[in-house]
Amino acid sequence: MAESNRKEERIKGEVLFKGRMLRLERDAVRLPNGLEASREVVRHPGAVAIIALQDQHVLLVRQYRYAIAQETLEIPAGKLDANEAPKACAQRELREETGYRGTMEHISTFYTTPGFTDEVIHLFLARDLVWDPLAPDDDEFIGVEKVPWDEAVLMAQRSKFNDAKTMLGILLVNGQIG
């Protein structure tokens, strides 16, 4: 089937749920073969994630993730506020979660799970870190850990992180600086 014949056309839709950080919609769509189907989509405002390098170490955050009922070790990340530029969000999130600010370089932008959500993550590399903390969000309880860069790369290569943006971010940056 030619690429131009794969598009699904939205016929109508409804909002099933609207929350603080996401919206769940159900749309009726017309398929390329003329049949109709239903699509449920989680709408998300987007997020940033930051590989923060300091003295051959990467700053990671340890936090409890309710959705998976366990702690994770991740790169700093956070949701975009309304009308917030990704680079400004990355600076804010890095300061809130680690206490540092730095020079930001955009590395990549990618969809997290395009099968059911439009969430996009803008990945940045932060260097030249300077202590300049912001107060963390009231609902965040985060511990910061410095991991040697080479160890973090091995952890990502061996699937030792249970967070995809962390693995992908480390591997993408390693391809640029390694």
Image (cartoon, rainbow, N blue to C red):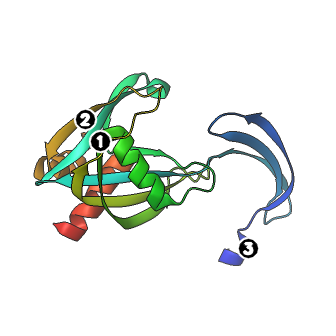
Q: Residue 158: horizontal and vertical position, in percent?
A: 21, 46
Q: Are marks 1 and 2 in contact (CB under 8 Å)?
A: yes
Task: State the residue position of label 1.
Answer: 99
Which one is nearer the viewer's eye here, 57 or 94? 94
**Earlier sequence position, callout 3 versus callout 1:** 3
Q: Could you tell me which residue is drawn at 35 percent across and 39 percent down?
A: 97
Residue 103 to residue 59: above or below? below
Task: State the residue position of label 2.
Answer: 144
Instruction: Specify the quadrant that holds the C terminus.
Output: bottom left
- Taking the image as shown, residue 56 lies to the left or right of residue 84, namely left
Label drawn at residue 62: none
User: Callout 2: helix, strand or loop?
Assistant: strand
Front of the two marks 1 and 2: 1
**Mark 1 belongs to which amino acid?**
Gly
Front of the two marks 2 and 3: 2
CA–CA distance in space, label 2 to label 3: 48 Å
Label drawn at residue 5: 3
- Taking the image as shown, residue 147 lies to the left or right of residue 124, namely left
CA–CA distance in space, label 1 to label 2: 9 Å
Which one is nearer the viewer's eye here, 58 or 65? 58
Residue 71 to residue 80: above or below? above
